[in-house]
Image (tube, coloured by chain):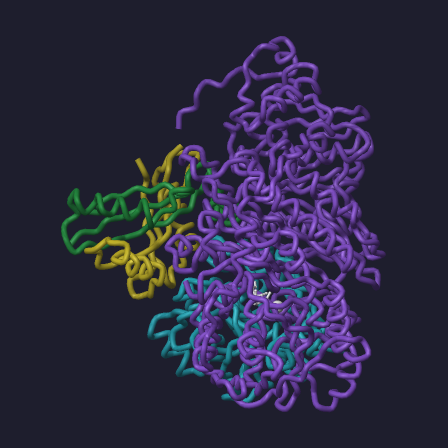
Chain colours: A cyan, B green, C yellow, D purple
Amino acid sequence: MTARVGVVTFPGSLDDGDARRAVRLAGGEPVALWHRDTDLHQVDAVVLPGGFSYGDYLRCGAIARFSPIMENIIAGAREGMPVLGICNGFQILCESHLLPGALTRNDHLHFVCRDQKLRIENAGTAWTSDYEAGQEITVPLKNGEGGYVADERTLDELEAEGRVVARYLELNPNGSRRDIAGISNAAGNVVGLMPHPEHAVEPLTGPTTEGLGFFTSILKRLVTAR
Amino acid sequence: MARVVVDVMLKPEILDPQGQAVQRALPRLGFEGITDVRQGKRFELELDGPADEAALARIREAAETFLANTVIEDFTVRVES
Amino acid sequence: MARVVVDVMLKPEILDPQGQAVQRALPRLGFEGITDVRQGKRFELELDGPADEAALARIREAAETFLANTVIEDFTVRVES
Amino acid sequence: MSTPAKPPLDTVAHATGTPEQPQPWAELGLKEDEYTRIREILGRRPTGAELAMYSVMWSEHCSYKSSKVHLKQFGEKAPHSDAMLVGIGENAGVVDIGEGWAVTFKVESHNHPSYVEPYQGAATGVGGIVRDILAMGARPVAVMDSLRFGAADHPDTKRVLPGVVAGIGGYGNCLGLPNIGGETVFDPCYQGNPLVNALCIGVMRHEDIHLAKAAGSGNKVILYGARTGGDGIGGASILASETFDDAKPSKRPSVQVGDPFQEKLLIECTLEIFRENLVTGIQDFGAAGLSCATSELASNGSGGMRVDLDDVPLRDSTLTPEEILMSESQERMCAVVEPDKVDRFLAICEKWDVIATVIGEVTDGDRLEIYYHGEQIVDVPPRSVAHDGPTLNRPLARPGWQDELQADTPDRLERPASAELTRLTLLQLVGSPDQGDKSWITDQYDRYVLGNTVLASPEDSGMIRIDEASGLGVALSLDGNGRYAKLDPYTGAQLALAESYRNVAATGAKPLAVTDCLNFGSPEDPAVMWQFSEACRGLADACQVLGTPVTGGNVSLYNQTGDTAINPTPVVGVLGVIDDVERRTPVAFRTEGSLVYLLGDTRDEFGGSAWAQLAHGHLGGLPPQVDLERERLLAEVLIAGSRDGMIDSAHDLSAGGLAQALVESCLGGGIGARVVVPDTIAAFTFLFSESAGRAIVSVPRSEEVRFTDMCRARSLPAARIGVVDGDALDIQGQFAVSLEELREASASAVKF
Ligand SMILES: Nc1ncnc2c1ncn2[C@@H]1O[C@H](COP(=O)(O)OP(=O)(O)O)[C@@H](O)[C@H]1O
Ligand SMILES: [Mg+2]
């Protein structure tokens, strides 16, 4: 049996299908979760996908954070359940205070969709163990509010504790502090990432297949944990 | 040195999806008794001179032509004490 | 029936690209003498009851937990006359 | 705002008793004879609500009164095609693409609203076309946009373009629909009349096709989606029937604001409703809102319909019944549902947080009856509103200046006299806003969402995978050239089709069907009407030859300022199918050493060319000739080349000619090319002529014999003109330009 990875659909989620496909291509069993669900259907890990949950009105992720399912996800994450937030999912994780800081309007004020080069800075998290530390990958990035901000002390702490998971290379696409593309919590089970690895899992439709590692990482972790 | 605030709100007849989203969310979070929410923008402008009539006239013009989209938005200008 | 206004602004230490874009554009449009611009949000809430201390306390809580993200934003709550 | 005392409700009974009461038919855009006809149809004066309905539904925008007589040809001349499942006349046509799959696609204009409020105008344009596709029973899967603006350096373009692009992106991105292509053109003729044409494509299984009709007495009429507000009231009639030069601010209709999040919910909710087979008829709300949806549903069905306006959920409680009927509030749909399915229907809406209300039912009569506060305010034969609108045979006349324009050929224009000047011409072309890199625009569009985008901008056509298991996919291109159409509207329309057709074939897909958006000036000008009729005739004739029927489209008239109309601009979308998207052919050169072949014939054709415009500001002469049989042949070769793995890349030749195509293929792959000018032709003509029916392909050496044999067997001229190699575009014996220099020129062309 393989691991069950839940993918939450909020009203306005857009990349939920892509995230489920990525889980499937990595060999896992994707489980569709609904924002109003009050239990997690025995999933072993959760992906909060990209999109515009609740229209991203007010602030990105601000309304989704109060969805019924988030109660269980927040509790699960605190107990070590692996959670990956991609783009809007990252914003939801910050709004939920599972990750520090916040994501703000891109410094150039435009939505941007591009193939983005990243460096995996920490290959020790639940979602990056299939990469080498320092490995460079290219995956799509698409957001309007992807600028990562936190106060200096928090930024220093993230750096010192190795919690910067991925960094933008060559071009900072949104004004993120210290070129941060993704971070983790202290335990390494919760990862938030602005770029979209789930769009880089097939040579036909992605710029590369270098996003697959996030999904194979978690499946290996879950299967060995059994 | 003075601070002038320009508030820009969607005209009443224009759909405000943001305000509506907030309004729908509030009761779910346990905040009852709010019958309408409108969301707009607030600009805080710092002047290097006094906020006299001439300065305010200029800011009103900037609001009219630039800060607000008067096809769909109204604005107000005021000096903040 | 009362109207309460919640103003939400980015904290001073947080970069405000929208405000900066406005500030950069103003002189190009011929509006000089503005040394800083910050852009934030303004919420107008209509209450179905009076804006008494209890109501304001609830709205302050809504602002704290929901309308503003206090990691990066400050807010103020006031009754509009 | 103080509300003036409301006049008493104008009921049917009241209207019958007050035949002499004056009515504002002229202010609502109706002509006197139209008003007289309404009175004849009803046998009395219309009520205010009826007048509102007729005025919007009989407006140019909704009734196609000036264009109908010309559009007929698309049906009459339509080539037989087994692929057509639903033809012209529905919300959108439906095309069989095999394996039980069908697609529906359509392009629509939102030109005037995008000039008034670029962001919301363009955004709601996307919203509207997406709902059209949804109403056919299809899941919308991709969008495209064809844009035309005034001069790139005009200050108003800096207002309009960024807003339009942000609006298209803002709405489409938020719906989760990849933007897979389009076009962006700049020309001073669009200064006060930008064109914003949006296309959506949807996918369904054959059995899921839904039509807009209300059948079955007792079935419920359900309005679902957003609440009704005062948006765009009168927009349908006023927007489509006036130019803006005389518009006082107060006359401008209030702008419609879109809520893409609401639309996303509407899409998911509607698809779930379709899956459970809960509707017998469905219609989106477009222009003319409730008036349009109810009268069309009733008119297409067998019975009548009764609607209670009091049940319409309102955003603004002060709206009058006339305003409720005319409101163009976005993100609303109307469904006809059997009574025992209503509960399930409402439950699904509840699941998606979509407001849904039963507002009426289908009756066994033959009237559309609308009630308000218990009183009857509308009692009309629905067909008379929806389908029997006026038809005009507007006068048309070939303009006096046409001969003069065609006589002013580009032959008199000075051509670059040296290799160095030719090189500069190339750089000027590559760095022009029309030809340059459009990533400043397209980077604001999500092209990855849904994970099925195989090709997107800057490819010749967008391509999406439909079936993950089999690899079945479709390709789409959207093209137009107003300069060619100005020189000769008949040929110009055919060239638009030919280019779009070629673009689809270049990616390896077989062209199947056509949609079009006809953007013209005022139909009251006989010269414009002539352009329009010629363009329709040209397009219909060409579709017949190419075997690609027109499945639907849209007309936008009154695109003019004062007496000056835009260039006639037919925009044509072609849909193609490809059995296996793995076989798609990209534009970019991929392999060093591959051989570059030029397919087709190059003549000295510069009328309406990019060069004539850029180097001399000239528009005159005749556009390139069209040879549709040649287009067909070229397409066959491009498709076979892809299917049998004989080519590495393919790129159609259009504006800017061979030079532009070479540059794009080089930049796309980051590899240069060495090209030899044949000694039978002048280098300048070879590089910049815009002869139609041409493409460049790169052929791996191992496939050369097979490929050239195929071309010879099919009698398609194929000339080996060079080889993929190096890091420059080297026109041997003439000049070379490094990729770096080309990239720089191209990248700086479109930035706002
Ligand atoms: N507004 C737009 N939206 C999406 N794609 C666009 C837009 N404008 C241009 N493109 C894309 O840029 C590429 C180049 O456009 P264009 O030069 O018009 O191509 P062609 O001449 O082959 O039709 C195409 O892939 C086209 O789809
Ligand atoms: Mg092309």
Residue D204 at x, y = what percent?
76, 56
Left or right placement of residue D4 versus residue D542 in this view: left
Residue A213 seen anywhere in this rendered image of the structure: no
Residue D364 at x, y = what percent?
82, 26
Q: Residue placed farthest to the top in the image?
A: D17
Residue A93 at x, y = what percent?
51, 66
Residue A98 at x, y = what percent?
49, 68
Q: Quadrant of residue D97?
A: bottom right
Q: Quadrant holding ligand 2?
A: bottom right
Q: Which residue appears at 29% of the width and 61% of the height?
A: C24
Q: Which residue appears at 33% of the width and 65% of the height?
A: C14
Residue C18 seen anywhere in this rendered image of the structure: yes
| Residue placed most toward the observer, D548 or A27 | D548
| Residue placed most toward the observer, A4 or D103 | D103
Left or right placement of residue D85 versus residue D731 in this view: right
Quarter of the picture containing the N terminus of chain D is top left
Classify C52 as above or below D54: below
Left or right placement of residue C76 versus residue A92 in this view: left
| Residue placed most toward the observer, A85 or D44 | D44
Q: Quadrant of residue D601?
A: bottom right
Classify D718 as above or below D324: below
